[in-house]
Amino acid sequence: NAGVTQTPKFRVLKTGQSMTLLCAQDMNHEYMYWYRQDPGMGLRLIHYSVGEGTTAKGEVPDGYNVSRLKKQNFLLGLESAAPSQTSVYFCASSYTTLIGDTQYFGPGTRLTVL
Amino acid sequence: AQSVSQHNHHVILSEAASLELGCNYSYGGTVNLFWYVQYPGQHLQLLLKYFSGDPLVKGIKGFEAEFIKSKFSFNLRKPSVQWSDTAEYFCAVRGNSGYALNFGKGTSLLVTP
């Protein structure tokens, strides 16, 4: 199993450009998440999905859109990138048991917006 | 508002010293509790977790954590740190009414030889 994979690993954008980050998991997990990590801020949830075709907003959703067309994939889109979106983006997936769930993280995408 | 607080932002220890990192949360109901570690340049890895049962949980690499419900705390401990423990440590909490994890801001640990 590859677990959670993310592409690309690095990207540099100019202000106003658009891009899509891809997250894929091969663990048949129902839930998937996108976080951003900024220095001194920990990880903050952008959007999440509790199943194929469903998405919901997290703590910092503005400027991002997501889609979950297939169970194994969760896409994060930036329509018009801004320097404030310079960050490291982590995808995670999880399954839920009766007592709780555990999130497994991908390797991250380092995005710089100039 | 629900929050997770990690008391120490930066910790420097010598090898073989004991480690305790504090974590407090503000959720009122049942919670799932986690400690993740992020080694330099790498992604988050799960150290240990608490769902229910014995409040003293053991994780990988000799780490353990104790859930004290009355104090809303989940502190991470290791009796003797190694240089390879240099990393950033994140406490995270999931309330049973939500799906996502809420993370603390992290503690950067530097272990010197």
Image: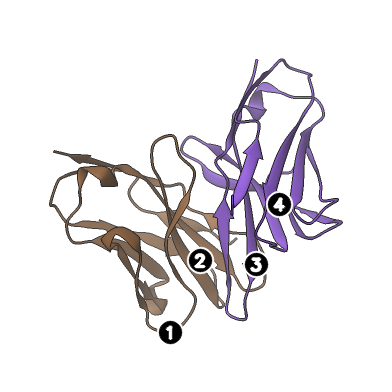
Residue sitting nearer the eye, B89 or A62: B89
- Badge 4 and badge 3 both on one subunit: yes
Camera-nearest label, 2 or 4: 4
Query: Residue B102: image x %, image y %?
Result: 56, 57
Residue at 67% in and 67% down = B98
Camera-nearest label, 4 or 1: 1
Crowding at mark 4 (Cα within 10 Å: few <14, some 14-19, many 20+): some
Question: Which image quadrant is residue A35 in?
Answer: top right
Name the chain under label 3: A
Total numbered badges shown on the rendered structure: 4
Instruction: Provide the letter of the chain coloured purple.
Output: A
- Secondary-structure class at tag 4: loop
Between the C-alphas of marks 4 and 3, the distance is 18 Å
A79 sits to left or right of A31: right
Which quadrant of the figure contains the N terminus of chain B? bottom right
Residue at 78% in and 57% down = A71
- Secondary-structure class at tag 2: loop
